[in-house]
Image: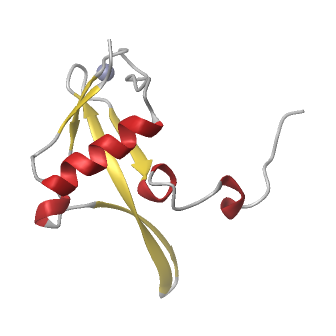
Amino acid sequence: MSAKIRTPGGDKAQQLASALLQRAPNLRCSVCGGVDFAMLEDPDAGFRSLLERKRGAFGYRLEATTLVCTNCGHVMQFADVVFKLESKPDDFGPPVTNE
Ligand SMILES: [Zn+2]
C-alpha cells in the first residue's frame, strides 16, 4: 500500500507533499506502520514549521514539513532543504560511522 499525505489544499501544499513522497516513496509510520498522514503545513496560507538553531542573538531557521500519522498520531518532521534537493549530504559535514 502506498503512502498518502492529506493536505489543506492549495498548489504549494500539494507540491510539498509530492516532493516528499518522491524522496520517500516507502513512507511508513515508524510506530504503527500506517501509510496515511496529515500534513500540518499550509504554505499557501503562509503557515510553516521551522527548525530553529540559536546561539545568543544569532541563529537560523530551516523550514520543515510536519506529518501526523492519522492512525496513531505519531509526529514526524522532514527538513525541506534535503528532500527538495537543495542540499547534499556533505553540506552537513563529514560523517561519523561505526565501521
Ligand atoms: Zn502511526
| Residue farthest top in this picture | 1
Which residue is at a point 49% across and 79% down the rendered structure image? 59
Give the image location of residue 73, x and y in percent.
24, 28
Identify the image quadrant of residue 1: top left
Question: Can residue 41 be seen?
Answer: no
Name the one closer to the observer, 18 or 96: 18
Q: Residue at x 20, y 25 (%)?
A: 70
Residue under the image location 48 percent in, 59 percent down: 81
In the picture, measured across the screen, residue 69 lies left or right of residue 22, that is: left
Q: Is residue 85 left or right of residue 25?
A: right
Q: Quadrant of the C terminus?
A: top right
Left or right placement of residue 40 versus residue 26 in this view: left
The residue depicted at 11 percent of the width and 64 percent of the height is: 45
Ligand 1 is in which quadrant of the figure?
Answer: top left
User: How many labels sit on residues?
Assistant: 0
Splitting the image into 4 quarters, where does residue 77 fall?
Answer: top left
Q: Position of residue 34 (x, y in %)?
A: 31, 17
Q: Residue most toward the bottom?
A: 57
Q: Quadrant of residue 62?
A: bottom left
Position above or below: 28 against 1: below
Type of colouring: secondary structure
Quick check: 42 above or below 70? below
Q: Is residue 81 visible?
A: yes
Q: Position of residue 74 (x, y in %)?
A: 31, 30
* Location of residue 42 with respect to 38 vertically, above or below: below
Front residue of 72 and 12? 12
Residue 94 or residue 20, whichever sits in front: 20
